[in-house]
Image (tube, helix red, strand yellow):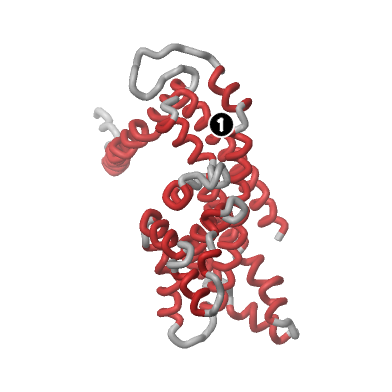
Amino acid sequence: MAQQGKPKKKGANTSLVFTNKMYVFLIPALAFFLVLWIYPLLQLFYYSVTDFNGINYDFNFVGFKNFSKVLSNGTLTNSMKNTLIYAVFTVVLSNLIGLGIAMALNTRIRFKGLFRTCAYFPALFSAIVVGFIWSYVYMPGSGMIGSLMNLAGLNGDTFNPLGNFRTALYAIAFVEIWKGFGTTMIIYLAGLQTVDESLLEAGRIDGCTEWQLIRRIKLPLISSTITINVILSVIAGLKAFDYSFIMTNGGPGKSTKTLMYQVYETAFTDMKMGRASAFSVLAFALIIAITVLMLFYMNKREVEL
């Protein structure tokens, strides 16, 4: 009597076929990623070693000449200094303000939902709208701050933070903080709401003050949230362009020319697309390096806490 073969496991085969078909849904996203990110990035590296002007495609290979020009003419040093000052100022203040407001609104107060909405409201506007609004706020004499100074008996015409090379960078950085602290607040609120209330009660029973509860319990427990906010703020600060372009056009002088603004000016004002590409490559490498170092340091701090 012939032995019958073992029946095939249809369930396993069906599951394998279904799993393979699921990868088909990755194709559109992968295509968009390759076309809109990888291909432009490769083009950026390619143009950085040419004398392409953005119009005429009859360009020549120049090697690392663009990189040497960028490194030797001082534009990288000035824009890097402005960018680092801008980034440090916005990262520190936006996170401190966002964390402070999040802790205040995480307590049992009335209308906290309304307060949260009001705090997050500036983040809903586009950078262009915010930039134009604050340009009128900062306007000497007739601006909001200048008008209030006139009502107080002070000379509002002398208030011109965007026209002073010592204060212009901090003035536009404050606008970035005003718009962005609501986003950091929301993320901090999400982290604070994961803190177990029983731990805080135990700390109060042991005689801890509110500051000790924040320092010893809350901050260590939301260390991953702090890492997320700091990294996002660092990346946003290093990519600063909008307010420098809208509010000051890089001035007065070169006081608000950031890395991204310098790339824009080199490409579309000087019409040196090859050199702008080299500038972008250096800025890209710098942002990646700073972000990786910050991420490594913050993750190490999380482990220590």
Depicted 157 relative to depicted 150: above or below: above
Give the labeled residue for mark 1. Answer: 282
Instruction: Give x and y (percent) for residue 197.
Output: 58, 79
Question: Which image quadrant for residue 135?
Answer: bottom left
- Of the pair 160 and 38, the residue shown nearer to us: 160
Instruction: Give x and y (percent) for residue 202.
Output: 68, 82
Instruction: Identify residue type, mark 1.
Output: Leu
Say if residue 167 shows up in the picture: yes
- Of the pair 156 and 176, the residue shown nearer to us: 156
Instruction: Find numbered disc 1 in the image and state the secondary structure of the residue it sits on.
Output: helix
> Horizontally, is 22 left or right of 72 in the view?
left
Instruction: Give x and y (percent) for residue 124.
Output: 37, 63
Say if residue 20 shows up in the picture: no
Look at 47% across and 67% down and name the residue there. 141
Quarter holding the N terminus is top left
> Horizontally, is 43 left or right of 72 in the view?
left
- Looking at the rendered structure, the number of numbered marks drawn on it comes to 1
Instruction: Give x and y (percent) for residue 203.
Output: 70, 81
Depicted 156 relative to depicted 113: above or below: above
